[in-house]
Image (cartoon, rainbow, N blue to C red):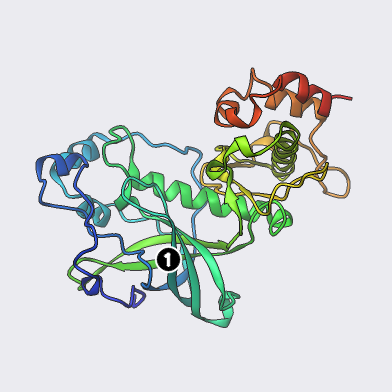
Amino acid sequence: MATCISKNLRSRKSSQRALSGAHAYGRHHSRDEKPSLPYFVGSEICATVHRPPHPPDEHAFWLTSELHAELDTLHPLVLCLKYQPTSGSVGRGKIKLKVLEDINTGDSHTCQVVKVRVLTADRSTQVARQDYVAKFYDPLYWNFDQWNTDYFRGADSQYAHEVEAYNHLQPLQGHLVPRFHGAFSADIPLPKGNACRAVRFILVEHVSGQPLSKLDTREYSSRQCQALMRAIINADRAIRQHDVIHGDMSPRNVMLERPMPQGRNEPKIRIIDFDSSTCGYLSEVGHISSGASGRRSPESRDRTVELWSHENSEDILIAFKLWIEAWDWNVWLQSRYRV
């Protein structure tokens, strides 16, 4: 396949920081660093439309004994070439994009996220020549010190689950979640430039604003914080109504699109990052149902209170602690959702 990054990695400035070998193999071979990140500003990436296989039931995978031994003896790049992404199906449509801005990249990241501009795109891809967010599921830059994790099946799982979630959430795209613009496979050149390795990625709408994790909660009143949390709960309810459990609801995955309103208006938010999501479970166990028209019924208010109470959402509420510490959460929750 001819798809590849068109700017050879060797053309990068020598002053750019190489990635340290802090992984298991790297502790014993300190001079064998991982290749520098290929998703740098200015790089141009060619890719082909791809459809992932059906996502696995699991989200985390334990190491096999074979892979456990290989982590100490084989370089992560060698392992990436041995444990290629699951095949799925490759389409004919091709695109070429240019990295404009780093959003969240680096070693020990499970995904590499950048802002890109599509330079060319086959008509069949239905991708416009504009700016997007590209999310690369590249296991090479996972934290190889997480001993019990199979990084390669983990990256496959994240990719397949996120694509499936966006397909379920089509009615919410552009409103409560970003618009999804397709799944792709890029061939990333090896350091010597004579071969490539496959990396899957998606394109989604570039959402303006900031994640809550980058905002100072001290700048917002209790009323504003309550309005924000109600918007998050309502978005979560809508997502579950489409048979998707987000799986990682936290401030870093909630984008505030515009300044917080001063009055009673609900703030404009988008929920992002569905790589830990689960689709289909809620209808399977009967927590949501469809009427005669096929439209799923909204989640009951009692169910919302149950799911978001301290007793059942402790991890989520710890993540949002700075946003909710000024009032009694359970009392407020019941006053807003119990009738």
Image location (x, y in percent) of residue 84: 32, 56
Q: Does 109 sit above or below residue 190? A: above
Q: Quadrant of residue 108?
A: top left
Q: Does 63 sit above or below residue 177? A: above
Determine the residue positioned at 57% across, 75% down.
130
Foreground: 121 or 231?
Answer: 231
Which type of secondary structure does the marked residue at label 1 adopt?
strand
Image location (x, y in percent) of residue 250: 57, 37
Image location (x, y in percent) of residue 52: 49, 57
The residue carrying mark 1 is: 185
Q: Does 38 sit above or below residue 167? A: below
Determine the residue positioned at 40% across, 44% down.
154
| Residue 299 in view | yes
Q: Could you tell whether 313 is left or right of 229 in the image?
A: left
Determine the residue positioned at 22% across, 59% down.
35
Q: Quadrant of the C terminus?
A: top right
Image location (x, y in percent) of residue 236: 69, 40
Categorize mark 1 by other alpha carbons within 10 Å: few (<14), some (14-19), many (20+): many
| Residue 286 in view | no
Check disc 1 and give the amino acid type: Ser
Q: Could you tell whether 222 is left or right of 63 in the image?
A: right
Q: Does 289 sit above or below residue 211? A: above
Foreground: 247 or 130?
Answer: 130
Furthest-front residue in this view: 219
